[in-house]
Image (tube, rainbow, N blue to C red):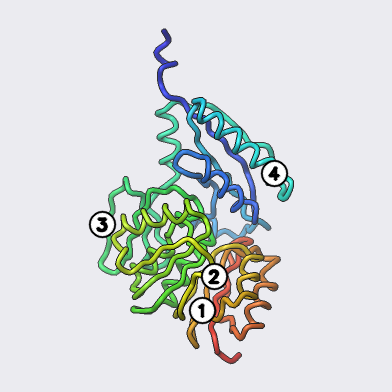
Amino acid sequence: MDEQNDKPRWWEVSVQVDGEAAEAVCELFNRYGQGGAVVEQVVGREDRESDETPTALTVVVKAYLPVTPQGRGSRQRLEGGLWHLSQLYPIPSPQIRELAQTDWATAWREQFTTLHVGQRVVIKPTWLSYSPSPNEAVIELNPGMAFGTGLHPTTRQCLLALEEHLRPGMSVLDLGSGSGILTIAAAKLGAGAVLALDTDPIAVEVARANVNANGVQQQVTIAQGSLSAAQGKFDLALVNILARVIIELVAQGLTNCLKPGGIIVTAGIIEEQAADVEAALCGQGVTIVERQVERDWVSLIGQIGQKG
């Protein structure tokens, strides 16, 4: 018997996408991939300093699936999901290769490193050691959801906004909380209470596990739901979703969840849709106080009840 055949093997499924399609592909890969999705070729510090700015952020999204009957079923569902997404977005056919167990483990973990965002936030995988300075807020994750590991510009924009606008003791609403990275960051940066809401039950469980692993469960409430589940008034709201969803939420009364003078951080907006989101917010009495742009991703930070 060939000993090599007894060792576990894995399929690596990868697809190159950009813009709004990247988030949809990541969500699909998170659902079926072992350990979630992996994102490559995302902008790093050295890329942001370059004078060459492409018109769209391009990423390579990868998923790893075991070469087993169950894994084969997951692969078929993943490929089927990609085909459906390709009817909505310009998504090419995926590239698929087979890896040995050791190659898979290395390939998966090599995508993640300790990340510094702004002056205080540090994101590190659970398997790496790190000695923080007294002022740093360290978020420890076992990355299972690529759009919640700080690698994607929308996550980074929200973390920078939190560092700038969050004050100790503030109440925070994280709407569409995903893996919980922004919820954890808010708690570690001094929020008095954080409500994290997501409509995806899997995301809720992932966020709950990450919150517990980071020891901030006393400050955080996690629940499955959307805007209607957000009871009370908040000092700051995080909405890192999609432009069309943000506009829908504003129409449903999103700004009513904020106290007078409260801050709303919106992200997940591609540049050509930013004007529509801004118009929706301003139509509800929000003054835009900051606009972040990274490649074709825009974050709008607004304040309630402020005069222009």
Residue that numbered label 1 is attached to: 257
Specify the amino acid type for callout 1.
Cys
Q: CA distance from mark 1 to mark 4?
A: 35 Å
- Numbered circle sitting on residue 13: none
Residue 266, x across and y down, in percent = 56, 70
Mark positioned earlier in the residue sequence (2 or 1): 2
- Numbered circle sitting on residue 84: 4
Specify the amino acid type for callout 2.
Leu
Residue nearest the viewer, comparing 14 with 34: 34
Q: CA distance from mark 4 to mark 2?
A: 28 Å
For marks 2 and 3, give the one nearer the viewer. 2
Mark positioned earlier in the residue sequence (4 or 3): 4
Which element type, helix, strand or loop, lies under badge 4?
A: helix
Up-down relation of residue 11 to residue 214 (above or below): above
| Disc 2 + disc 1, Cβ < 8 Å | yes
Mark positioned earlier in the residue sequence (4 or 2): 4
Residue nearest the viewer, comparing 3 with 113: 3
Residue that numbered label 3 is attached to: 131
Q: Residue at x 40, y 77 (%)?
A: 171
Q: Residues within 10 Å of mark 1 (few under 14, many from 20)?
A: many
Specify the amino acid type for callout 3.
Ser
| Disc 4 + disc 3, Cβ < 8 Å | no
Q: Residues within 10 Å of mark 4 (few under 14, many from 20)?
A: few
Mark positioned earlier in the residue sequence (2 or 3): 3
Specify the amino acid type for callout 4.
His
Which element type, helix, strand or loop, lies under badge 1?
A: helix
Q: Residue at x 48, y 30 (%)?
A: 66
